[in-house]
Image: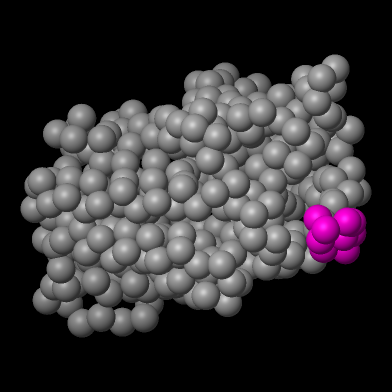
Amino acid sequence: MKWRLRLMMLFEYAIWGAWYVTVSTWLGKTLHFSGQEIGAVAGTTAIGALISALFVGLLADRLFDTRGVLAVLHIVGAVLLVVAAQQHTFAVIYTVLLVYSLCYMPTLALTTSLAMRHISDPREEFGAIRVFGTLGWIVVGLAVGTWGVEATASPLLLAAALSVVMAVYCLSLPATPPLARNQRFELRHALPLESLHLLRDRSMAVFALASFLICIPLQFYYAFTNLFLNEIGVVNAAGKMTGGQMSELFCMLLIPWFFRRLGVKYMLAVGMLAWVVRYAMFAFGGTDQLMWMLWLGIILHGICFDFFFVVGQIYIDREAPSALRAATQGLITFLTYGLGMFVGSWLSGWVVDVNSSTVAQGIVVHDWHAIWLIAGGCAAVVLVLFVLLFKDRRAEASSPVATTA
């Protein structure tokens, strides 16, 4: 069963990784979309994340078998990806990919809930299953980069093919009927409204605000890194970007060691500091002799992601009452992958447009040095505010000073 679930995760995240990393290069270099248009397309997944909780709560929890919902969503998604790959105008591509994101983003939560329903100890077993999603992202990224199709619509077609495979595979998974079929649906079951009162605690409120704010500069990386690397002449940019996911796997192993020595506050701070350093590397790096700076910026993804998002999940699990842990995790997901990434997609697009100019034959040239410094500056402001305002009460209570006070 565990290997079947691992394969499910591999397909699930390979679909996302196939098109999302390189779509900016196709839109920018081939279709000549503006920065705001590219950012808006990247932000379609954020809109999907904003409403996916309601969608999942209504369909999978109360109406249909999870595997059936997954199969239908991925089949519809495959059709939408094929349609998007044939388009050339912003309005149509944006609309189609927005509808696609409304289909795909709920499947992230659905695959997680399905996996947890069929393992005995999610805390001990889920990590070894979820890691195959990262492996799927790495494999497909290497494939797209090796084939040299980053500036084409081929990654969308690859994602469509993987969606069909995923849909068929989901039907082979064990039955996962809804657990709340006979319960009356209420909005509070789908949205994490009951966890809002936890924000009265200063530390939790600061953490939630920092989580939202740090995802704004984060979207600069997701939306524009591949376009940036291709524009400055990096070969096999998509393949090189998988170094970020590889470092993510390695940094996951380091979390327990650092947790014992740094604690929650400074691990979160290190994660945000890594974003500042990453954007500095992108701003001053280049090909040839300065390629090491670009590599460092990519590899820092492991610290950026694990030391903030994974440690943040651990912090929530520790601080929130057991009855509200799932709801609070949902609230933070809403603030980060939903609201934060949505705001970041529009802001990053605007910054890219402001720092661009058109040269001969309509070719757009970007001032990537300025763009990455702005992104790094935003991350630095969030880091400073977090360090000044956040207090880990448990760490303070266990310190020698607190003990003798």
Q: Quadrant of the C terminus?
A: top right
Relative image position of residue 50 (x, y in whole percent):
50, 69
- The foreground one among 357 and 398 is 357
Relative image position of residue 385 (x, y in whole percent):
82, 52
Above or below 310: residue 153: below
Residue 128 located within the stretch drawn in magenta: no
At horizontal 85% and vertical 17% (from top left) the residue drawn is: 289
Q: Is residue 15 left or right of residue 223?
A: left
Whether residue 353 is visible to the viewer of this picture, yes or no, is yes
At horizontal 64% and vertical 54% (from top left) the residue drawn is: 30
Write the start and end of the magenta stretch as one range.
Answer: 353-363
Residue furthest front as drawn: 361
Q: Is residue 253 left or right of residue 53?
A: right
Q: Is residue 30 left or right of residue 115?
A: right
At horizontal 46% and vertical 47% (from top left) the residue drawn is: 155
Q: Quadrant of residue 403?
A: top right
- The foreground one among 281 and 54 is 281
Relative image position of residue 339 (x, y in whole percent):
60, 67
Q: Quadrant of residue 300?
A: top right
